């Protein structure tokens, strides 16, 4: 069977998509592809100038593209709530792609709400955003939520005794925990949708190793890894976005599934099923993480 590519994206005309962290990298490539397929796309990010530039660039490549930018800081729960309030009332949301993230911050930082920055931005902000957007999603005929996880989830663990890294902070421990949380969240959201009949498809994806601003992120270690690994293992941001686009648009993407590159070690290649590590399959962990996330964010998934 031929490898899945951009040419396989079905028409997205009439659909509304919200993509977090869409001003560059994987998010931008995802937004561009969805705009090319006819979707109305809301790009979000923290920098208005970058957002405006991204919208302009997509408009130049896709004449007549239905794209706009909205400010969204996932490291601030009040900003998440304000973003949702600015969305047009009554418009169904067909697709939410929880893409934004920070990686391997060398020193422990905290969000506006006091959460460890990677857990707060990569996971808790998306948890709260998805909860607040649930009524919009359930108005769509076939809503999808796509969560970006990572190969880093392979080494992750949810440390309920030190969830915020206050006792011991490690850049990669915190990052791996946040990406494991995103995969657990995707799977648990599907389980709960199935249990109550929401008809929502919750799917996770990862980009393998892609050359993006995230991969070239803060810290000497990340920069060194980027320089050494990129020529051998990394693929472009456009190729790295393909598993996300498969999860977001393909009729063959299974609700509750997890997709990534199908090459050696899931580092690069066309989209295919990805390995879910055992720690992402523990139902008791998923239930406890969900309840803790509701408590921390003050949000619930109620219609």
Image (spheres, rainbow, N blue to C red):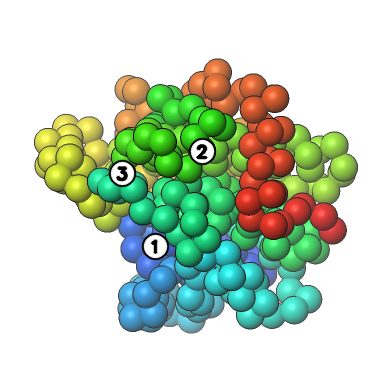
Q: Residues within 10 Å of mark 1 (few under 14, many from 20)?
A: many
The numbered mark, 2 or 1, whose residue comes first in the sequence reads 1
Residue 100 is at least partly visible in this image: no
Q: Which mark is residue 163?
A: 2
Q: Quadrant of residue 187?
A: top right
> Which of pointers 3 and 2 indicates the residue nearer the eye?
2
Q: Residue at x 41, y 36 (%)?
A: 167
Q: Rounded to the nearest whole Å, what is the CA distance between mark 3 and mark 2?
A: 16 Å
Q: Label 3 belongs to which residue? A: 104
CB contact under 8 Å: marks 3 and 1 = no
Looking at this rendering, what residue extends furthest in the top direction? Answer: 278
Residue at (84, 58) in percent of width and height:
303
| 64 in relation to 80, above or below | below
Q: Residues within 10 Å of mark 2 (few under 14, many from 20)?
A: some
Q: Which mark is residue 28?
A: 1
Residue at 33 percent across and 57 percent down: it is 25
Element assignment for label 2: loop
Decide if residue 279 is in sight here: yes
Query: Residue 224: horizontal and vertical position, in percent?
Result: 13, 40
Left or right position of 298 against 58: right
Q: Position of residue 183 (x, y in %)?
A: 55, 36
Give the camera-side residue of 207 and 191: 191
- The image's mark for residue 37 is none
Q: Residue furthest right?
A: 196
The residue located at (42%, 41%) in the rendering is 166
| Rendering coords of residue 87 (x, y %) | 65, 77
Between marks 3 and 1 in the image, the one whose residue lies nearer the viewer: 3
């Amino acid at each position: 069977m031929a490898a899945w590519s951009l040419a396989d994206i079905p028409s997205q005309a009439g659909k509304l998509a919200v993509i977090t962290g869409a001003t560059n990298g994987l998010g931008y490539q995802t937004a561009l592809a969805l705009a090319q397929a006819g979707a109305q796309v809301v790009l979000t990010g923290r920098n208005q100038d970058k957002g405006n530039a991204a919208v302009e660039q997509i408009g130049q490549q896709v004449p007549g593209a239905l794209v706009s930018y909205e400010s969204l800081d996932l490291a601030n729960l009040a900003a998440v709530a304000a973003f949702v309030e600015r969305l047009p009332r009554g418009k169904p949301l067909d697709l939410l792609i929880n893409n934004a993230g920070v990686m391997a911050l060398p020193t422990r930082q905290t969000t506006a709400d006091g959460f460890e920055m990677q857990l707060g931005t990569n996971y808790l902000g998306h948890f709260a955003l998805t909860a607040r957007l649930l009524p919009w999603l359930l108005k769509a005929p076939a809503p999808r939520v796509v969560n970006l996880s990572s190969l880093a989830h392979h080494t992750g663990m949810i440390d309920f005794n030190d969830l915020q890294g206050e006792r011991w902070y490690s850049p990669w421990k915190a990052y791996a925990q946040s990406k494991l949380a995103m995969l657990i969240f995707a799977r648990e959201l599907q389980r709960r949708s199935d249990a109550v009949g929401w008809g929502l498809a919750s799917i996770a994806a990862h980009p393998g190793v892609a050359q993006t601003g995230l991969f070239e992120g803060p810290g000497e270690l990340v920069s060194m890894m980027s320089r050494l690994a990129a020529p051998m293992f990394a693929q472009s941001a456009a190729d790295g976005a393909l598993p996300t686009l498969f999860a977001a648009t393909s009729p063959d993407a299974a609700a509750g599934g997890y997709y990534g590159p199908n090459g050696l070690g899931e580092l690069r290649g066309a989209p295919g099923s990805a390995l879910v590590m055992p720690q992402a399959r523990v139902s008791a962990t998923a239930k406890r993480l969900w309840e803790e996330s509701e408590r921390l964010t003050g949000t619930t998934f109620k219609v």
